[in-house]
Image: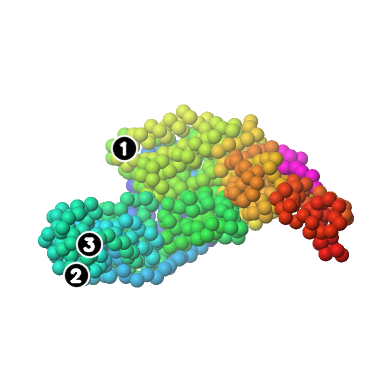
Amino acid sequence: MNVGAFVCGCGGAVDVDLEGVREGVRGVDVVASSSLLCEDGLPKVRHVVAEYDLDHLLVTAESEGCRRRYRRLLDDAGMHPDAVSFVNHRERAAWVHDSAEATDLVARKLNAAHAGLREEAPSRSVSREADGDVVVVGDAETAAALADAADVTLVADGREFAETDHDLRDVTVERGRVTGVEGTYGEFEVRVEAGVTDDCVDCMECVRQGPDEYVTASPVDVLPGAPDGDWVDCCPTDAIHPEERTLEAAQVVYPDASRDTRGGRTGFYTGPVDAATVAAVESRRDGLERPQFLDVDRSVCAAGASSQEGCTVCSDACPHGAVDRPTVDSVAFDEVACESCGACTSACPTGAVRAREPSNRRVAREVETLLDPADRSGLLFSPDGVETDVVAFVCDERAARALDAYGRRARERDDLEYPPLLPVEVPCADTVGEAHVLHALAAGADGVAVVGCGGDCLHSGPDPKADLVDRLNRATTDLGLGERVAFFAPDPDDPGAFVEAVGRFVELDLDDSPVPSGHEADGVADDSTPNPAFNTHEWALESVRAILPHVDHRDGIGGLESFGRVEVSDDCTFTPTCSNLCPTDALRREDAGLEFDHERCVNCGLCEEGCMEDAIRVDGGLHLELLPEYNDGDAWTTVAEGEMRECRRCGKPFTSEASAQKISEEVGDVVAGIANDVDGDVFEYCGDCRAKLVYDV
């Protein structure tokens, strides 16, 4: 792929050294710059595109008008209009940092964009057909607006529509109040409870005789809490009593719903409802097609496969109802319902579910490029450039818009500046997990910032990364790095708190990392596992191993949830249950002993859940003394020891003493006398010899 980078000075509106940026960009086929590249410089861009036969452009442009010009240029050149990656050099660079810092940062961002481009996943999509059924709850205006485009059912939800100004002639109006909405796009079920059954013939007698505040006329309904009285007996069809029913719909518009799933589910719209909502419903009337966000490999899933509940982190993490547990030991992903927040992918320890774009591999390459020491030469990396390397994982929704708002304010008022961050955009702060942060520190970052929505995240609600930050600062402290992780929530209307918090974190809380730059991740820690590269567990372990030579660390690294340590009590009878259940083969039985491979354990808890003796306990955290490099090269450690029972007849070891004794205690009386002339207990004989004794062979 031939790639060109184009840097614009926006007519002097950005204070960056164009020559310095050109000098810092590497690996591309050509770099060009101009004071006003998207206007007078466009003919030169066309010439460069043709001369170098470019396949993709990296362009510093933030204005939508500028971006349209580049897309038209590509279209005129016979290229795909999306064969361009835009880098923000104004709002999140030159307008909030000084010239040297901005010059440094823009070059790094262009290099990171190029690195990400090389790892970009090929496009795929998922689709689902749907009928045109839409349920609207309590909003006559929206129901009327959609009536020409869909089959609309309006649930009154306790409201009165007798004198509405909206045309509901083509709308089915249902009495009742909504008590719940389940399902996903195309398959929603709306639970409704009404005070009047479908036996009602709309005679209006209850409306005439009943209490005004508890009875509605259109539709006829009796609201919860209505007082009893003679008026209840007026109904000729005995329809005045509670009834529950379920309505099916492809989409649901429920303005007053509580957003228990932040950001909603695809096809489920909460308030406020506006023209854009109506347009979205209409566009999805017959179905939808969207990019495929996930790659799923169930063969390495740690959910379990033996009717025992194992790892549940993906279903626990998903805020959109897109991950289901159809059985206790299985997981199902609804990729149409997926909102690409990345919560399941950052939580999954084995890589059974992975984000397609940006993939963990792509994120890793962008981080490494932002920190790459190969850039530190010449004019670009003067002493006045970016001094403290803080990798910032930035939510590309509200957080990104807030940062852009800060930049525009800074340009307008010249009153806002904060230390530069090395940005990697992600779909949501939930995309970021322990492996992402540890990798950034292994690649030489002085600190890691997670920049998200904060108080009311579109996906996860308040303080979505507070727990992650606490856990990882415990881990970095145990690693000897001190606290190096922070979460920031930029409020577009109040930049002061963000500026102060970022300034304190970067300038006061962080010192230079002892870990040098230059680490390039493979995303694996154990070549013997079937897990895909850049899964959370192995990527994190690889990063820890890259950090360890440069720090004075503790043996136990707390706060890491994708690692588990097994402890076994004396109640263990050495049955093979735990080793059979373990989805990562981290447990094995050797003779009468039980051995554990900490390097493979992902803390799923399946062994603890399935142990019949309740003898196993699994605690999170990474324990270095259990890794092979600290254990004479042996990955296995003995966690329980016992004795083998030898067959009284043939002398062959056949089971553990503890297991044999337990079986004898439980069923010994039942089988007593089953074999004639047997010396001792029948359970002192192996299976072959026992059968011979029973059948007098």
- In magenta stretch: residue 281: no
In the rendered structure, are the residues bearing label 3 and label 1 in contact, judged by CB atoms less than 8 Å apart? no
Quadrant in which the C terminus appears? bottom right
Which label sits on residue 230? none
Q: Residue furthest right?
A: 650
Circle 1 packing at 10 Å, graded few (<14), some (14-19), many (20+), is: few
Residue at which label 1 appears:
494
Q: Which residues are magenta?
A: 630-644
Circle 2 packing at 10 Å, graded few (<14), some (14-19), many (20+), is: few
Decide if residue 650 is on the left or right side of residue 576: right
Indicate the secondary structure of the residue bearing disc 3.
Answer: loop
Residue plotted at (70% across, 50% down)? 666
Indicate the secondary structure of the residue bearing disc 1.
Answer: loop
Residue plotted at (41% across, 47% down)? 460
Decide if residue 507 is on the left or right side of residue 591: left
Q: Looking at the image, which is closer to me, 126 or 689?
A: 689
Q: Quadrant of the rendered structure where residue 547 is?
A: top right
Residue at which label 2 appears:
201
The first of marks 3 and 2 along the sequence is 2
Q: Looking at the image, which is closer to me, 460 or 294?
A: 460
The alpha-carbon separation of the residues under discs 3 and 1 comes to: 54 Å
Percent position of residue 20, x then y = 47, 43
The first of marks 2 and 1 along the sequence is 2
Percent position of residue 3, x then y = 50, 57
Q: Quadrant of the rendered structure where residue 517 is?
A: top right
Residue type at mark 2 is Val
Percent position of residue 568, x then y = 67, 42
The alpha-carbon separation of the residues under discs 2 and 1 comes to: 57 Å
The alpha-carbon separation of the residues under discs 3 and 2 comes to: 11 Å
